[in-house]
Amino acid sequence: MAFYIVQFLTGLASAASLFLVASGLSIIFGVTRIVNFAHGAFYMLGAYVAFTLTEQFSGAIGFWGGIVVAAVIVALIGVLVEMVLLRRIYHAPELFQLLATFGLTLMVEDLVVLIWGPSDLLGRRAPGFRGAVDFFGQNIPSYDLFLIVLGPVVLGILWLLFQRTRWGVLVRAATQDRDMVAALGVNQKWLFTSVFAVGVFLAALGGALQIPRDAVNHALDLQIIVDVFVVVVIGGLGSIVGAFVAAVLVSELNAFGILIFPKISIILVFLVMAAVLIVRPWGLFGKQEAPARRTPGLTVNPWRPLTSGERLAAIAALALAAGLPLVGGNYALTVGSEIAIFVIFAVSLHFLMAVGGLASFGHAAYFGLGAYGVALLAKMAGLPMIVCLLLGPLLGCLGAAVFGVFAVQLSGVYFAMLTLAFAQIVWSIAFQWVAVTGGDNGILGVWPERWAASPSHFYWLSIGIAALAVIALRIIVFSPFGYALRATRDSPLRGEAIGIDGKRIQWTAFVIAGTVAGIAGALFAYLKGSVFPDSLGISLSVDALVMVLLGGVETVSGGVVGAIVYKALNIWLVSRTDLSKLVLGAFIVLIVVAFPKGIVGMLETIRNRRRPKLSKPASLTSRIETAE
């Protein structure tokens, strides 16, 4: 019994730091509607800065002074980021703010390695909490007991701040309806800055308090951000009490899951998150938002068919790409095949986002399911490559069909978070179902047959399927189904009034996008010759989002161009510099700030500016006067 109590207390100690980080993200998310992927980076910066201050300046400010000062320093960095970067793009589509914070995360990952090195750093013990307390033969670190007490104390301080101050009232009001707060004359600019500062301070404080418990390393941001998103969604946007309860729930599930449900321990928190989103989309303690006037984050202009000149340009580009084997070596052809595969992956998500208005944060699930489908058919059933390529993506189709039933019931950020939960569930199954998937060891030896084994033949196969995927999706876009999907995106109520079954239309689009992503995953399995759980991971889903947003979600060819530029630049930078993430992140931030409509949107803007303006046609009256 004592062992379980100690395990429970250990979970409470972990919940304290998780609550600090999650409460900061909940505040930022609730008020500014920024899906701040950089929140984990601020948590990591808090740990690194606290390590330096407690090691180098402990004599001047002491250990606890170093912890607080580190959080303040990172909060000031957060204010600078908000004023210089985020304030410039508040009027851009909200998903571009996600892209900017992702670019910032890439930059921070390389910067911490550049400043502190790649090795793990071990912080010193907290003064006064270096021992352990004996509990019926079980030792409980005294620092864990300190964290257990600290969590409710911080909760009480935050509750007083938000319930008993005018600033707190404004923050709570902005969480529910930002437009109404602005209409009352509140300066949103400085309200957002102050909220961002408080949120970053809490994240950095959570990171700084972890240095006596865990080693400081440059992977801390990704380790914490997924759990933080889960906590925020379960607790409810903008709810501090909800963040605390959800942090305790998630931490205890992590603590006891491995003991009670070892086979599904990794899945537990995502199952809970999915269940909460399905039953109560705004979280356990959140409140339903004011209805949105448009699809959150998307202001897509009506698509138009390609002009004859654009068709010729597309055919010429495809012909040039097909000629790469005549001039390129095996490495160039392998890179070209990978880029073509990710073009398929990106256009599937672009179709879902731009035409359907559905921003998925877990699109890698269907990419990975397609890859595993091919691997299982090839290795276990021994089927020919053609049959595997035809049947393997059906696993992605099946996953999209099942998950889509629940996902399309939601919209906006809740839809995005539910897709993330489903993707993490699939990843967890692949990671833990070792007997079938091989777990972390993956499935090896998935090589193409002789007719497609050479780099040139596989390259032609990849770009051929990519071209067919792009053409097929464009045909769907301009079909009656495509127009019905756009009607559902732009005005669900009007669409319903003329007889369009919006949920069925969106579910069908979800299945189509998942199937196309599965095709990309199937080709990827043959390209790499193996499949690992990483093919289902959140990082790959984020890559897909970056490709679409970088190319331009409001454009026709944004997915194609974004995939080519992002993958080519990423591969080239990795081969040229050790700071590839820093350069790539800076490039992404530059594009978002200078051209928030993406690369294709930028090119269209330049072309429209150069196009000569047509003279305004004369009115009927002026033409009569001229004739007289």
Image (cartoon, rainbow, N blue to C red):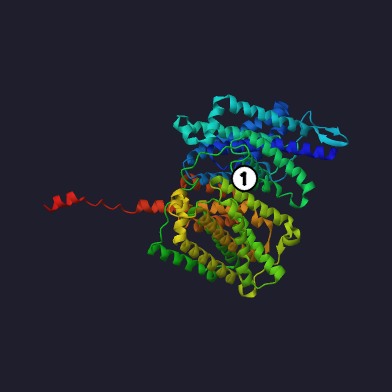
Instruction: Tell me, yes or no, if residue 47 can be seen here.
Output: no
Instruction: Classify 10 Å Cα crowding around label 1: few (below 14), some (14-19), many (20 and above).
Output: few
Q: Is residue 123 above or below residue 357?
A: above
- Horizontal side of 26 relative to 212 (left or right) equals left
Q: Secondary structure at mark 1?
A: helix
Q: Residue furthest bottom?
A: 451
- Horizontal side of 459 relative to 8 (left or right) equals left
Instruction: Tell me, yes or no, if residue 443 can be seen here.
Output: yes
Q: Residue furthest right?
A: 137
Q: Is residue 431 above or below residue 36?
A: below
Number of numbered callouts drawn: 1
Residue 189 pos. (x, y %): 49, 33
Q: Residue at x 49, y 47 (%)?
A: 295
In terms of depth relative to the viewer, which is nearer, 564 or 53?
A: 564
Residue 106 pos. (x, y %): 60, 47
Q: Residue at x 71, y 48 (%)?
A: 268
Q: Residue furthest left?
A: 628
User: Mark 1: which amino acid?
Assistant: Val
Q: Quadrant of the N terminus?
A: top right
Q: Image quadrant of residue 119?
A: top right
Residue 373 pos. (x, y %): 65, 64
Which residue, given by chain and number where applicable, does mark 1 sit on? 279
Residue 235 pos. (x, y %): 63, 39
Q: Residue at x 61, y 57 (%)?
A: 402
Q: Image quadrant of residue 329?
A: bottom right
- Horizontal side of 256 relative to 331 (left or right) equals right
Q: Image quadrant of residue 3?
A: top right
In terms of depth relative to the viewer, which is nearer, 386 or 404?
A: 404
